[in-house]
Every structure is written in C-alpha cells, then in structure tokens.
C-alpha cells in the first residue's frame, strides 16, 4: 500500500473551501449557545482564559494530527485510521479511534438537532412578535411551552435533520462545499452586524469586563474540565469530523497554517458571540449572566423584545444560530455517510436515509428529556445531559488523547513528513512534544481531576 491513498468522494476545490468547511464545522451551537452560558456559569474571565489555552495549546496540535491522518487516508475516519495503522505497521487497537469518533458524531447529532430545532422555532417566534415587551417570566413561559411540547420539538428536530440531509446527499463538492461557500460568508456578515448592534445598543463594557476579568477563585477542576471539553467540542476535534474533512483537502495546502486559521476563526466567533449576548443581557435589568442553557432562549429574547427594532434583530440572530448549527451538523453526518458508502457500498442517498433515521430515533430521547422524561435521571443527569457530558467531556478528550499518542508515537514518520513538509526543525520538535507529552499529560490530568470533582466532591 502506498503512503498516500486516493479519495472516492472527491476533493475540495481549494484550500479555502476546506477552511470554510472546517470553520463551518467548528463554529456552531458550541460557540454561540454553549460557550456563553458555560462561561457565564463558571464565572467568566478565568474560564475563558483556560478555554483559549486549551484551544491553542492542545486543540491546534491535535487538529493538525486529525487533518493529517484524514488527508493521508483520503477516506472516512474509520478507514483513514485503518490506512494510517496499516501503513505505520502499528497495533490494530488504534483503529477504535475511528469507530468511537463516528459513533460520537452520530450521538452528538442526535441532541444537536433538537437544540438547533429550538433556534428554528425562535426564528418564527421572533418574526411573529411573540416576545414584544416580554419580561423574564413571560419569556421563561414561552420557552417552557416549547420544551414541554414533544410534538413541536420533534417537528423542528425533523426539519433540521432534513436540512442536513439535503446538503450531505449532494456530495462533497456540490453539497457540503457549495453550502459552506454560501453560508459562512453570510454568517460572518450577520455576526459583525450583530456586534455593531451590541456595541451601540448594549452594555459592551460590562460584557468585556465579564469575559476578560481574571478571577482565579472561580477555577475549580470541574470548571477546567468543562473548559477543555468545550474547547474540543467547539473545535470539532477528537471524533473524526475534521479527519473526514481533511480527507478532502487538496494535497498542496499547508496543514499547520490552515488549522491555525480555523482555530482563530472559531475562538473569535465564540468570543464575539459572548460579547454580543452579554452586552444585550447586561443592558437589560434583572437578568443573570449565569442563566444556563436558557441564556440564549430566555434572557436574550427578553432583551430583544424590549429594544426598539429588537424583534428584527432577534429574528436575524436566530437565523444566524441556525446557519452556524447547520454547517456543523453536516460535519457530524458526513463521516458516517462516507463510511457506509465505502464499507457497505451504499449510495449516498441510502446512507443518508439510514443514518438520519437512526439519529432521529435517538434524538427522541433528548426531546423527551425536556418534558415527560425530565425526572428520569442517572447520577443527576437527564438523557440529554448524559449524552452531552459523555460526548464533550469524555469521548472527545479521550479521542483527542488517542489521536495525540497515535500520531506522536505510533505513526510512521514518513507519512508525517509527506503531509506536513513545511513543519521543520524546532516547530516539528515542538509539535511532536505536544502530541507525545504535553497534550496527553494535560488531558489525563484535567480529565481525572474534573471527573473526581464532578462526581466525588
Ligand atoms: N463544533 C461544533 C460546535 O461548536 C460541534 C461539533 C462537535 C461539530 C464535533 C462537529 C464535531 O457547535
């Protein structure tokens, strides 16, 4: 077997399409919905600092490794890992990284589609003016009305999954490539528009203070685990989405530079979203920054409902969230679709239908965990909390750990040199040192302490 495989799915038109697709995958509900409320719950500044450290010190090197494995194998993560393991003559058990990742992607997609469905519902609510003049209680009531209604949740979850399928069915170039080329510029323009609105109409300096004031006392191990899990989640690493996209990356594009651009965009969007949300929240009396998952769906709509022109801005905001979620969700589906096509000879359409049906059924668990199944908990977790914690805080960091160790110790050097010839001398040494020692040590340490803190303290 040669070192460089060929792709049966096609290759992106240019390096830019890869950047847009990877940024599209990275920028999503994790940045716009999760980052602000988790940062809010864990006290702001210090949490954000650890989050950024995790993104650049651990996230970027691991993401490079993922793209490298993907591009060298030119197939779904499962087969790209198999290719890397075979060509390197490494132990077969490394192949479970691909399996774990593809499975994690489908699990994430199952709850992701439900939350994205909320955003779809809110586009309609905003446009209809349901929240004009609403106070916290009214907004909480409207949110509860949505989450208490399984049927309404299922309708939106189905609509969102259909949106994903429409793109993925059309293939790598025509489907995913074209979608991100349209959606991502739109997303950036809308985000900047929202930022301008927040600067002029919101309390920007309070938001800035909140996100950047360093208060070390809020840094528990639990908070650090959340920051690391969130860094993995928002970068889409540790589970193969980026590996799948790397498989379609043109051979001559520099992996290091490209990944750095994606990580920069991703953290920029998280911070800008935080600034937008907190500027608006702080400008409205009586709303807490630590409002939890409802921050975007309760606190923010109240603020929108009480501002001149706020409803239009609110509708635009939720469209923005849907676009961000959409371009991420397609990267959760593509790895499994690619695998079914390779391994079972399925057509793209058949692979999509089978997988989306399975994800839809699993998603019903999340739908019900907000209403009739609210009290069905294990260790204090609802079904949704459990899937969220299991994927973001356990599977993704462990996937990242395995990818680091594999690339650092087990992968044949010739593959690495072939894929990143531009990484020379001290840079190469530093990158390998991160993969072999820094990332594994940091991930293990944070993981063990965070789990201990969460369950035993
Ligand atoms: N990165 C996406 C977000 O921030 C979520 C995601 C995770 C997408 C893992 C793909 C893979 O919302």
Image: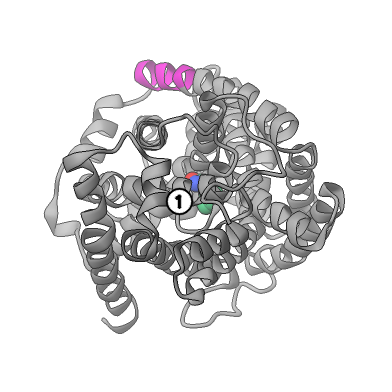
Q: Residue at x 52, y 34 (%)?
A: 251
Left or right for 92, reference 441? right
Q: Is residue 199 magenta?
A: yes
Label 1 CB less than 8 angstroms from ligand 1:
no
Left or right for 344, reference 273? right
Please tell me which residue lies in front, 310 or 247: 247
Please tell me whether mark 1 sits on a helix, a strand or a loop. helix
Q: Is residue 42 magenta?
A: no
Task: Name the quadrant containing residue 382.
Answer: bottom right
Q: Which residue is mark 1?
A: 66
Q: Residue at x 41, y 21 (%)?
A: 195
- Relative image position of residue 141 (x, y in whole percent): 61, 51
- Relative image position of residue 165 (x, y in whole percent): 77, 44
Please tell me which residue lies in front, 387 or 172: 172
Whether residue 287 is visible to the viewer of this picture, yes or no, is no
Left or right for 23, reference 147? left
Magenta-drawn segment: 192-201
Please tell me which residue lies in front, 68 or 440: 68
Q: Residue at x 29, y 38 (%)?
A: 423
Q: Residue at x 28, y 65 (%)?
A: 440
- Relative image position of residue 359 (x, y in whole percent): 73, 61
Whether residue 210 is visible to the viewer of this picture, yes or no, is yes
């Amino acid at each position: 077997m040669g070192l460089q495989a060929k792709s049966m799915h096609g290759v992106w038109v240019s390096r830019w399409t890869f950047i847009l697709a990877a940024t599209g995958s990275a920028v999503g509900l994790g940045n716009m919905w999760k980052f602000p409320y988790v940062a809010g719950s864990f006290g702001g500044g210090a949490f954000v600092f650890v989050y950024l450290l995790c993104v650049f010190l651990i996230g970027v090197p691991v993401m490079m490794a993922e793209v490298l494995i993907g591009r060298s194998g030119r197939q779904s993560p499962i087969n790209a890992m198999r290719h890397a393991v075979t060509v390197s003559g490494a132990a077969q058990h490394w192949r479970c990284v691909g399996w774990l990742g593809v499975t994690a992607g489908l699990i994430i997609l199952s709850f992701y589609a439900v939350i994205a469905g909320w955003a779809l519902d809110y586009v309609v609510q905003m446009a209809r003016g349901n929240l004009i003049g609403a106070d916290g209680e009214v907004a909480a009531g409207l949110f509860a009305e949505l989450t208490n209604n399984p049927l309404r949740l299922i309708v939106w979850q189905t609509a969102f999954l259909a949106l994903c399928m429409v793109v993925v069915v059309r293939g790598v170039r025509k489907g995913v490539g074209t979608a991100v080329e349209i959606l991502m510029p739109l997303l950036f323009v809308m985000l900047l528009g929202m930022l301008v609105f927040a600067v002029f109409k919101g309390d920007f300096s309070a938001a800035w203070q909140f996100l950047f004031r360093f208060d070390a006392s809020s840094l528990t191990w639990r908070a650090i685990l959340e920051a690391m899990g969130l860094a993995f989640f928002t970068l889409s690493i540790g589970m193969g989405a980026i590996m799948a996209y790397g498989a379609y990356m043109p051979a001559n594009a520099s992996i290091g530079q490209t990944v750095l651009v994606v990580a920069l965009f991703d953290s920029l969007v998280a911070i800008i979203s935080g600034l937008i949300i907190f500027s608006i929240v702080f400008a409205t009396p009586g709303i807490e920054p630590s409002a939890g998952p409802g921050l975007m769906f309760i606190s923010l709509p109240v603020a929108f409902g009480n501002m001149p022109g706020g409803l239009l801005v609110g509708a635009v905001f939720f469209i923005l969230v849907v676009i961000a979620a959409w371009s991420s969700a397609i990267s959760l589906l593509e790895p499994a679709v690619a695998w079914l096509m390779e391994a079972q000879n399925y057509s793209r359409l058949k692979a999509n239908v089978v997988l989306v049906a399975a994800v839809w059924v699993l998603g019903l668990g999340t739908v019900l965990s907000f209403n009739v199944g609210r009290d069905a908990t294990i260790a204090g977790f609802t079904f949704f909390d459990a899937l969220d914690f299991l994927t973001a805080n356990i599977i993704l960091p462990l996937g990242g750990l395995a990818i680091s160790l594999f690339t650092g110790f087990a992968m044949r050097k010739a593959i690495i040199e072939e894929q990143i010839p531009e990484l020379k001398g001290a840079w190469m040494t530093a990158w390998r040192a991160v993969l072999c020692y820094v990332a594994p040590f940091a991930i293990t340490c944070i993981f063990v302490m965070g789990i201990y803190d969460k369950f035993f303290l």
